[in-house]
Image (spheres, helix red, strand yellow):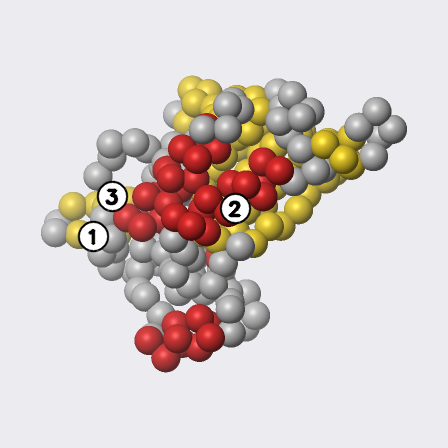
């Protein structure tokens, strides 16, 4: 969320003024919610910077995946998503991402072999291991942290695009016949997990 006054924090929703109304700028998916792409504190990077990143191949759709024994998302005291053994997927969407990238990332996430086989070797994907997936949109994954003491979020996709690609990613994952749970877009959430290992990987496409 890009709000005024303080840097965004994971799991915290901030607002910006839009036509006299407090408008929430993005976090985790709420289907049917009105989303704005014109938040006061949200600005696209300069065109030269954007073109340079495209040329250098620095635009990614990002998934941070964690092998878990359990994971859940709570909103206003209510559990909205919960899984047992499986994957917690934190999803970051940058400018320049598209449905083709989302499709490829879905294939990688569901096909990534990080679960133990009969010899306790990482050789099974989440579906082969009989696991489920909890998908949570996490815009802070696209932050530029190379300079200064405050992250820059200029690389992040505008909220409407990010929400659309998030929903597309979730839909593609569900087409594989695996149980998919999600968080809630633009909500103040508490995400709990028991990381198994710990095992955590950063995937980009």
Q: How many marks?
A: 3
**Circle number at residue 36:** none
Instruction: Give the residue number, with chain letter if any, for mark 3.
Output: 35
Instruction: Report the disc number at residue 105.
Output: 2
Farthest-out residue, right: 119
Q: Secondary structure at mark 3?
A: loop
Residue furthest to the left in view is 19
Judged left or right of residue 65, residue 39 is left
> Could you say whether the residue bearing mark 1 is in a helix, strand or loop?
strand
Q: Is residue 156 visible?
A: no
Give how far across and how far down residue 6 sits, in percent: 40, 57
Q: CA distance from mark 3 to mark 1?
A: 13 Å
**Which image quarter: residue 85?**
top right
- Label 2 neighbour load within 10 Å: few <14, some 14-19, many 20+: many
Q: Report the mark closest to the observer, 3 or 1.
A: 3
How many residues crowd mark 3 within 10 Å: few (<14), some (14–19), many (20+)?
some
| Residue under pointer 1 | 17
User: Looking at the image, which residue is at 50% across and 23% down?
Assistant: 177
What is the x, y in percent for residue 42? 31, 60
Task: State which mark lies toward you, 2 or 1.
Answer: 2
Of residue 29 and residue 105, the one placed in the foreground of this image is 105
**Which of these two is toward me, 95 or 5?**
95
Q: Is residue 31 visible?
A: yes
Q: Alpha-carbon neighbours of circle 1 within 10 Å: few (<14), some, or many (≥20)? A: some
Above or below for 182 versus 44: above
Taking the spot 52% from the left edge, 51% from the top edge, the residue there is 62
């Amino acid at each position: 969320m890009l709000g005024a006054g303080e840097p965004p924090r994971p799991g915290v929703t901030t607002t910006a003024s839009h036509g006299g109304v407090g408008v929430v700028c993005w976090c985790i998916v709420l289907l049917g919610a009105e989303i704005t792409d014109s938040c006061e504190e949200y600005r696209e990077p300069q065109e030269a910077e954007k073109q340079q990143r495209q040329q250098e191949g620095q635009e990614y759709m990002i998934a941070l995946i964690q092998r878990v024994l359990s994971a859940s998302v709570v909103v206003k005291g209510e559990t909205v998503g919960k899984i047992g053994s499986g994957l917690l997927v934190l999803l970051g969407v940058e400018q320049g991402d598209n449905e083709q990238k989302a499709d490829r990332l879905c294939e990688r996430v569901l096909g990534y072999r990080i679960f133990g086989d009969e010899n306790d070797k990482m050789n099974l994907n989440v579906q082969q291991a009989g696991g489920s997936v909890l998908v949570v949109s996490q815009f802070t994954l696209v932050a530029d942290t190379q300079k200064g003491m405050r992250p820059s979020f200029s690389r992040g996709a505008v909220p409407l695009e990010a929400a659309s690609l998030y929903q597309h990613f979730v839909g593609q994952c569900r087409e594989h016949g695996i149980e998919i749970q999600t968080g809630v877009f633009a909500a103040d959430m508490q995400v709990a997990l028991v990381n198994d290992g710990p095992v955590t990987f950063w995937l980009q496409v």
